[in-house]
Amino acid sequence: MHQTDFENRVRFIAKLARRLHQYGTTAGRLEKAIDNVSGRLGLGCNSLATPTSVIMSFAVLDEGPGALPRSTQVLRVDPGEVNLRRLVEVDAIAERVFSGELDIESGFRALEELQSGLSRRATVMRVISFGISSAAVATLLKGVLADVIVAGSLGLLIGIMASVVERRPALAPSFEALAAFVAMFAVSLIAALLQPLNTISVMIAAVIVLMPGLMLTTAITELSTQHLVAGSVRFMGATATLLKLTFGTVAGMQVANLFKLKAMPLLAQPLPGWTEWVALVAGSYAFAGLFQAARRDYPVAMASSWIGYLCARFGGLLSGPEFGVFLSGLVVGAVANLYARICNRPGAIVRVPGIIMLVPGTVGFRSLFYVFERDVYLGLDKAFSLIVILISLVAGLLFGNLLLPPRRHI
């Protein structure tokens, strides 16, 4: 292989790896995808992906299995967020290169031209999705009408704060703590002066988008599949986020106590049962927006959320909540692989929205919150519940891959 041709292929694969990482591909799937792409382009690749870096070593397959690598690429990357629209576009570009519709240089330019930031419309949609998801979760937590209204309003506020933080990177490290502080103090103020509320439930619903439940699930999945470095780093990152959220919440409570804000007794009745299904539809729509799915993929993303939630409910009625979470993970994992096989598109369109309502970020938050409140035994009880739910969900996803192995790795 000519050196120029080799370098063009390496540049294309390195850019592909950067884009896949940027748009939320997990370490194991990223490594498999890059290794497969390299093989289809005549290169042998050894790759190592972590939440903050990607290392790839390339050799030419025609030179034999013992050939020394010609090039090693080290990419320093920031932890990516799930962007289903861009993930589909990256996958389509790679497929067009494989089919010969695009040459490698044109494929590289197409990857280079993908926009990284959000458009104004996408930013507005993201803020609205913060509010809708918070209101939906408050409903699913069996709140009263006031809980839903306050949680939705605070979700909108936190969405606006998140948009401001994107333009001011210096605020990013403290954003979760600041958001939790503002939400907790606002909830305490409203509950004391204006309207009785389920304080903790509203607080959790308000910051639900910031809960690192998906990150925790991904971390345990990576550890279970022997991607130990990536899983350990991601788990510690999720723990740090939970600690910041918990600290902000406790600080907000302390300031509220300083001003002697005491919540009024709650007398209102919970919302009727049918509102749960309205919340499910609204929440699935909001999470499709937060994951930045393309408009054509909204029905698939929303339907996968319904499948995951309904399987968890059905399995819970059969044999307890742990089996419900396991069953949901199994069905969603298998359906995601089936979708990828039939439609030749990334299974993440189904897999990520399908488990988002099951991930146990709120349980981890409650565990740390009780510890901060000196209720260690209740905190340990919640921590054990967190472990059980994580194991059940990850086991379901792994068994789903066994039931229907993935043909694609995105």
Image (cartoon, helix red, strand yellow):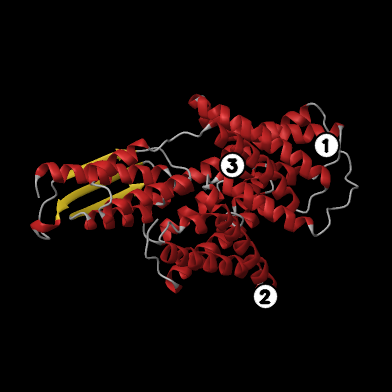
x, y percent for residue 311: 62, 67
Please say if 109 is above or below 218.
Answer: above
Q: Residues within 10 Å of mark 2 (few under 14, many from 20)?
A: few
- Left or right for 351, reference 368: left
N-term mark: 2 or 3: 3
Q: CA distance from mark 2 to mark 3?
A: 31 Å
Which residue is the site of mark 1? 191
Secondary structure of the residue carrying numbered label 1:
helix
Residue 395 in view (yes/no): no
Mark 1 in CB contact with mark 2 (< 8 angstroms): no
Closest to the observer, 79 or 309: 309
N-term mark: 1 or 3: 1
Q: Amino acid at mark 2?
A: Leu
- Left or right for 72, reference 157: left
N-term mark: 1 or 2: 1
Closest to the observer, 145 or 220: 145
x, y percent for residue 174: 55, 30
Q: Quadrant of residue 250?
A: top right
Which residue is the site of mark 2? 318
Q: Residue at x 9, y 50 (%)?
A: 1
Which residue is the site of mark 3? 210
Q: Amino acid at mark 1?
A: Ala
- Left or right for 373, reference 50: right
x, y percent for residue 82: 48, 46
Secondary structure of the residue carrying numbered label 3:
helix
Please say if 166 is above or below 388.
Answer: above
Q: Amino acid at mark 3?
A: Leu
Q: CA distance from mark 1 to mark 2?
A: 38 Å
